[in-house]
Amino acid sequence: MKKIFILFFTLCTLSFAIVDFEGINWGDSKSDLNIIFNSLEKEPALEENVEIFSVNAPKDFVAKYQFFLKNNSLYKIRVVFDKENVGKSQIQDIYSRLLKDIGSPISKVPINKKIDDLTIQGNSLKFIPNLSTNLYLNGIDTIDEYGKMIDSNLYLEYVDSNIDNNM
């Protein structure tokens, strides 16, 4: 009986932590995040009741972390990779690490949107690292009206699985 209780407690504890972000939990407030990241900067948000806070250059090859809060409750973390320093080999390393640590993606969704004269193209790979988190590896290119790529970005998005309806 004791072993079953310990197993249940361990599974519950692991399922509520956000993988790769020790000490941060879904539903945390801005003040909770300030304890870990004391230099949070507010960024513009397009959605009502959503605030975005970021911390710059927390790790090699990472430009910034963005924390998305709706009604002061954390529901998404975006890792924005440094597009000046991340090349093909780093992208392969990131993908290999995800395969090793989490396993194969459960889905691959192509991204193809037209916005005025621009086209947004890429892919989104969905992983499920634990019961409470969905993880997306998004590679997104912006193409101008002449077919020339004008921007390219790589993101990892950690999303609370209880409210994930993005993908």
Image: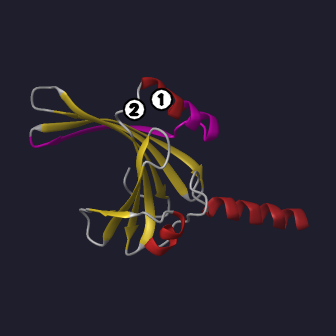
Q: Is residue 91 left or right of residue 119?
A: right
Q: Is residue 26 left or right of residue 68?
A: right
Label 2 element class: loop
10 Å crowding of disc 2: few (<14), some (14-19), many (20+): few
Whether residue 1 is visible here, answered yes or no, is no
10 Å crowding of disc 1: few (<14), some (14-19), many (20+): few
Q: Which of label 1 and label 2 is nearer to you?
A: 2
What residue lies at 47% left-to-right and 24% top-to-bottom?
89
For label 1, the residue is 90
- On the image, the x and y values in percent for residue 141 come to 27, 34
Above or below, comparing residue 59 to residue 73 in the picture: above
- On the image, the x and y values in percent for residue 135 come to 49, 48
Q: Disc 2 residue type?
A: Asn
Q: Is residue 167 left or right of residue 21?
A: left
Q: Disc 1 residue type?
A: Gln
Nearer the observer, 154 or 61: 61
**Earlier residue among tags 1 and 2:** 2
What numbered label is drawn on residue 23?
A: none
- On the image, the x and y values in percent for residue 4 come to 84, 63
- On the image, the x and y values in percent for residue 88 come to 42, 24
Q: Is residue 115 magenta?
A: yes
Above or below, comparing residue 166 to residue 126 in the picture: below
State the CA–CA distance, disc 1 to disc 2: 9 Å
What residue lies at 49% left-to-right and 67% top-to-bottom?
33
Quadrant location, the N terminus? bottom right
What residue lies at 59% left-to-right and 53% top-to-bottom?
19
Whether residue 142 is visible here, answered yes or no, is yes
Which residues lie in the magenta part? 96-116
Q: Are marks 1 and 2 in contact (CB under 8 Å)?
A: yes
What numbered label is drawn on residue 85?
A: 2
| Residue 117 quadrant | top left
Q: Is residue 103 magenta?
A: yes
